[in-house]
Amino acid sequence: MLAARFAEVVLPHLGDALSLARWLTGNQADAEDVVQEACLKAHAGIAGFSGGNPRAWLLTIVRNASYTWMAKNRPRSVVAVGDLADLDDVSPPPGSDADSPEAALVAKANSAAVEAAIAGLPQAFRETLVLRDINGLSYREIAAMLGVPQGTVMSRLARARGLLMTELGGRHHEPA
Amino acid sequence: MSPHENRPREDGLPQDPQDMKLMIHALVDGELDAAAALAVERRMAADPELAAEHARLVALRGALASVPRPTVSDDFLTRIAAIGAAKDAEDVEAARAGPVKAEVPPSVQPQQQSNVVEMRPRAARWFNSFDWRQMAASIVLTAFLASGATQWLATADNGAESFAVAVANGHRRSLLAASPVDIVSSDRHTVKPWLDGRIGVSPPAPDMAKDGYALLGGRVEVIGDRPMPALVYRHHEHLITLVAAPRQNEAKSVPVADDLSAGGFLLVHWTDDAFSYWAISDAERPALDDFVARFRAAIIANPAAGSPG
């Protein structure tokens, strides 16, 4: 019975789990270790999964497992996730002039460039962007996962996308 | 951001330009209800800067969609699946070691009888965590069977006809709901990725506004036990729901559009290589047939409408 539930709740979302872990840890091989660790935790806690979005549930566990793994294996690279007040100021995202060949440039960006640009984002922005644009979670689900208000999710997402568009649109950073 | 800047205008949207940009993001993300989406689209039409932001976001979304997703290797999948199987085996072992449980194989005791007899000793061990899990599992199973059986009676019994009834019920429900769509957008580049993100499949969504059929958006229909993508088009004052069920091997091929009706609505059913389509509307039969003909012509003429790029 539990095996069936595990197969139903966890297995379909392994791709998403690997994506998130890959973007949080920075590489694919580590992502598999992290996801395996997360799946052990998910299995132990499967009785506590009470419906809702199984993907969001699994990704919450994957996120925690990623940070635990990072703290253990790469203590230097972990930023204090709790202290982001300065990041969350709604300052104008870069790239706000009206008409743009930028959209065309962004659309043409190859996937290697896009990956590099995502990897270059500050942790809090990267995490929010990946949860939304790669994993497809809703604002509400992301807010619940990160323990921040929805408005914070929205502003981080806008900042993250602004940075990506600046990077991919081939423009230099403007003072924000 | 002082409170003055945030005082809503008549359309209920924020005055502050930065907050207004967040609304554009929310629109692209399918986070707005129909009324708010309409208001934002109106603002966009009046403000080229907002329209440009929207264009950039749609472009960025396309770029992000092109990022390759990690593949789940068979090896990895097997390893993870083994976690579930192995731990479950341990539980079964534990069950056998303890007092008699429901999982005792039928060969050892007659199943029906043993369940009845075992209720007492199990009740005595109420606080044992293992019993809790079994209890929870059986409640879930019961709920699943109860709801599943209803669905099964409604849909599995006589194939196409009951599927048509389910499509009709979904359409009726959507007309009564606050919004007939879960993702509001006239842009297939928004609708298709949204459906892909939710259920991993999205049908072609050609833009047929010039033919008089405007794409309103999409939603997810659950028919039988399968989530399916549905597109919603508007033709004058009528809504047309187009449910696209991914073809399965056993599904009957219906290359020529088949006129049906169910629940007071007219339906047209046909299939192509990838999908089994059900178009339903309260529009007149000629209008619905015309929609179907144009939709089929559009996806043949431009299969690229099927790709999210």
Image (cartoon, coloured by chain):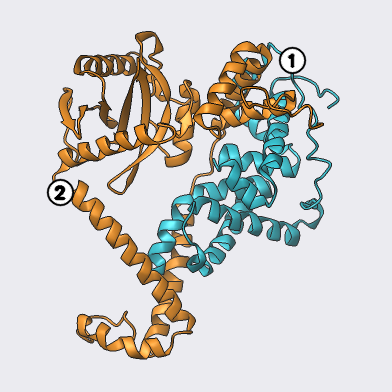
Label 2 marks which chain's residue? B
**Location of residue A91 in the rendering, given as x and y in whole percent from the top left corner:** 80, 30
- Residue B247 visible from this viewpoint: no
- Which chain corresponds to the colour orange? B
Query: Which residue reaches farthest top?
Result: B210
Looking at the image, residue B21 sits to the left or right of residue B118; the answer is right
Q: Which residue is mark 1?
A: A97
Give the number of marks: 2
- Which chain corresponds to the colour cyan? A
Q: Amino acid at mark 2?
A: Asp
Q: Choose between B60 and A140: the one closer to the eye.
A: A140
Q: Which residue is mark 2?
A: B157
Looking at the image, residue B36 sits to the left or right of residue A150; the answer is left
Q: Residue at 62%, 41% (x, y): give it.
A: A130
- Residue B221 visible from this viewpoint: yes
Residue A44 vs A67, above or below: the answer is below
Looking at the image, residue A114 sits to the left or right of residue B31; the answer is right
Q: Do the residues under discs 1 and 2 have CB atoms within 8 angstroms?
A: no
